[in-house]
Image (cartoon, grey):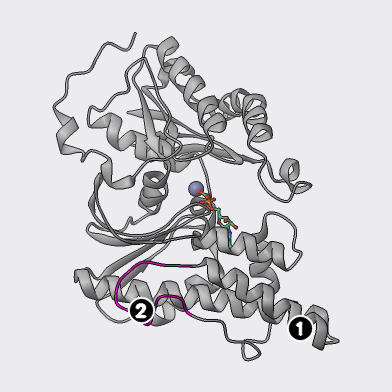
């Protein structure tokens, strides 16, 4: 089965084609960074309008790159949530309409399931079961994954997501949007011994996270440094480094706990923050014990992309799951409410049109 995947939940337009036999045939992402940069963050209405402009040309581009014609597409998968409602509606409306016009089934995909399954696009893929650390701009979750649709949330952030904390702290340090990668670049020049930030919620049992206090800690440290340190550029890098180290070590401590608690020896990193180099290095150093497997996809599969939606959509479409003609999007959507694959496998296909 050959599936066209569409991702428009936030500020990236992503389109890809995944083939159940041949794998990923084509994958293209258009980032709206330049549009939102002057506002210091994503402006939802501008995001929606740009998806409208970019989506069809990107679909044409991907079809050409894959050397596939529209009548060779067997299903369309689009992100149905969570995300910005206007942005989601662009991908859902176009995806559902194309599927109707082409006479093929459509499916609304959960964005975080896309992130969660993106590592399966690598060769070899991680084996089930695994513990996934899902770290993006909107979510921070530890999930026990038994298979597609078999998700047990072990812990989650009680306030800001890890990526959100990166972005907000980047703003505190006057870095330009998108802040996370900029902060990570600055941190590389920081002195790791200069400041020590707290590791929130690690002194008590449990697998939940809290990152909002780190942003305030960074703000106070930055104010004090501006008043007391003449080497302001270095001070800023030192703070970035201390912040990054605190987030990374906090994530590491909780991942270790999750592996111990579940007895599962495999950890998979996914979502935009898992592109962070320091996070990968520290995880590899700490969890690289014999008998344990650490898995993370290439950076392009960590941040938002269409390939992960095409892949997740393929898993479910191939198992028989379908979207009715009256489609819906879900700006908020709990990952552990998704149906397992088995329950949908025997379902009869409703007519595509
Ligand atoms: O998964 P993603 O592309 O979009 C969402 O689903 O949110 O994640 C975006 C988040 C942003 O908060 C961004 O700052 C963060 O991932 N991010 C990073 C890095 N690359 C992206 N954070 C830290 N270090 C990075 N290298
Ligand atoms: Zn994402």
**Of 346 and 160, the residue lying toward us:** 160
What residue appears at the point 36 percent right and 14 percent down from the top-left corner?
325
What residue appears at the point 51 percent right and 26 percent down from the top-left corner?
89
Q: What element carries label 1?
A: helix
The x, y position of residue 50, in whole percent, is 67, 30
Give the mark nearest the N terminus, 1 or 2.
1
Camera-nearest label, 1 or 2: 1
Which image quadrant: the N terminus?
A: top left
- In this figure, what is the number of numbered marks? 2
Q: What element carries label 2?
A: loop
**Residue pointed to by mark 2:** 288
Quarter of the picture for ligand 1?
Answer: bottom right
Report if the CB atoms under discs 1 and 2 are less than 8 Å apart: no
Q: Main SS of the magenta segment?
A: loop
Q: Is residue 187 visible?
A: no
The x, y position of residue 213, in whole percent, is 54, 71
Residue 308 falls left or right of residue 318: right
Q: What stretch is highlighted in magenta?
A: 199-210
What residue appears at the point 25 percent right and 44 percent down from the top-left corner?
149
Q: Compared to 93, does 119 lie above or below? A: below
Tell me the CA gap for discs 1 and 2.
37 Å
The image's mark for residue 225 is 1
The x, y position of residue 193, in whole percent, is 62, 91
Where is residue 338, by image quadrant?
Answer: top left
């Amino acid at each position: 089965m050959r599936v066209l995947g569409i991702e428009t939940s936030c500020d990236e337009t992503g389109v890809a084609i995944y083939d159940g036999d041949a794998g990923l045939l084509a994958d293209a992402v258009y980032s709206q960074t330049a549009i939102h940069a002057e506002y210091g963050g994503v402006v939802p209405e501008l995001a929606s309008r740009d998806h409208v402009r970019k989506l069809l040309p990107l679909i044409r581009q991907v079809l050409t790159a894959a050397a596939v014609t529209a009548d060779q597409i067997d299903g369309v998968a689009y992100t149905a949530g969570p995300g910005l409602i206007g942005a989601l509606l662009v991908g859902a409306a176009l995806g559902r309409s194309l599927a109707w016009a082409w006479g093929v089934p459509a499916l609304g995909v959960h964005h975080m399931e896309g992130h969660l399954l993106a590592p399966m696009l690598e060769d070899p893929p991680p084996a089930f079961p695994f513990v996934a650390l899902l770290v993006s701009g909107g979510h921070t979750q530890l999930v026990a994954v038994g298979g597609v649709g078999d998700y047990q949330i072990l812990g989650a952030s009680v306030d800001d997501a890890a990526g959100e904390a990166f972005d907000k702290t980047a703003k505190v340090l006057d870095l330009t949007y998108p802040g996370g990668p900029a902060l990570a670049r600055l941190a590389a020049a920081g002195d790791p011994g200069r400041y020590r930030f707290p590791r929130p919620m690690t002194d008590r049992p449990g697998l939940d996270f809290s990152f909002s206090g780190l942003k305030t800690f960074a703000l106070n440290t930055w104010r004090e440094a501006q008043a007391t340190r003449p080497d302001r550029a270095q001070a800023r890098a030192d703070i970035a480094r201390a912040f990054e180290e605190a987030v990374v070590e906090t994530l590491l401590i909780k991942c270790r706990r999750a592996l111990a608690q579940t007895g599962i020896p495999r950890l998979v990193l996914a979502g935009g923050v898992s592109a962070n180099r320091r996070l990968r290095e520290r995880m590899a150093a700490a969890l690289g014990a014999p008998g344990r497997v650490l898995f993370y996809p290439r950076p392009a599969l960590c941040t938002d992309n269409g390939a992960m939606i095409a892949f997740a959509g393929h898993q479910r479409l191939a198992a028989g799951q379908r979207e009715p003609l009256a489609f819906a999007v879900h700006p908020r959507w709990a990952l552990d409410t998704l149906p397992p694959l088995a329950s949908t496998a025997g379902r009869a296909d409703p007519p595509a049109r």
